[in-house]
Image (cartoon, grey):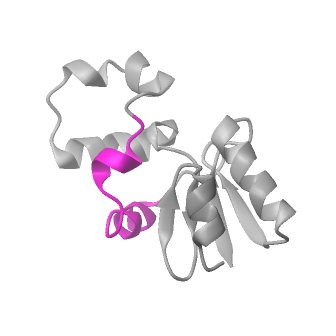
Amino acid sequence: MIKVYGIKNCGSVKKALHFLEEHKIQYEFIDFKKTPPSQEELELWLKTIPLTTLCNHKGTTYKKLGLKDKNLSQEEIKDYLLKEPTLIKRPVISTPNETIVGFDLEKYEKMQW
């Protein structure tokens, strides 16, 4: 089963869910606010997604925490992602074949769902 991780009121998540529903693709939605990702899930995502892609450097949480001005190690960034899941770029979509981040219509249309 496809898993979509994110926040319901996020614009990119809404677009992704609309795409999946429009194409009759079944999925399970996991709300970051109710169920933050585990360290195991994060490590699994990071096997195929660079940390710089997974961390949303443009988001409100990143700016609010002042992370731009901090010289953080990879491990410190991972810790922040686990403590503050709204730092994770959304949506994270995990399929049996791959994990992707963000809404990209062209990529979605080419995927093997």
Instruction: From the viewer's side, name the closer residue of 14 and 32.
Output: 14
- Write down the region rendered in magenta: 38-56
Quadrant occupied by the C terminus: bottom right
In the rendered image, the vertical position of residue 63 relative to residue 15, given as above or below: above
Q: Does the magenta stretch include residue 44?
A: yes
Q: Is residue 37 left or right of residue 17?
A: left
Query: Residue 85, position in %: x, y?
Result: 49, 43
Snapshot quadrant of residue 67: top left
Q: Does the magenta stretch include residue 102?
A: no
Q: Is residue 32 left or right of residue 85?
A: right
In the rendered image, the vertical position of residue 22 relative to residue 56, given as above or below: below
In the rendered image, the vertical position of residue 73 relative to residue 69, given as above or below: below
**Residue at x-position 84% and y-position 62%:** 21
Q: Is residue 112 left or right of residue 67?
A: right
Query: Residue 108, position in %: x, y?
Result: 62, 63
Snapshot quadrant of residue 27: bottom right
Query: Residue 23, position in %: x, y?
Result: 82, 68
Q: How many labels does the image show?
A: 0
Instruction: From the viewer's side, name the closer residue of 105 and 3.
Output: 105
In the rendered image, the vertical position of residue 94 relative to residue 73, given as above or below: below
Query: Residue 100, position in %: x, y?
Result: 50, 62
Quadrant occupied by the N terminus: bottom right
**Residue at x-position 19% and y-position 47%:** 74
**Residue at x-position 59% and y-position 58%:** 106
**Residue at x-position 46% and y-position 26%:** 61
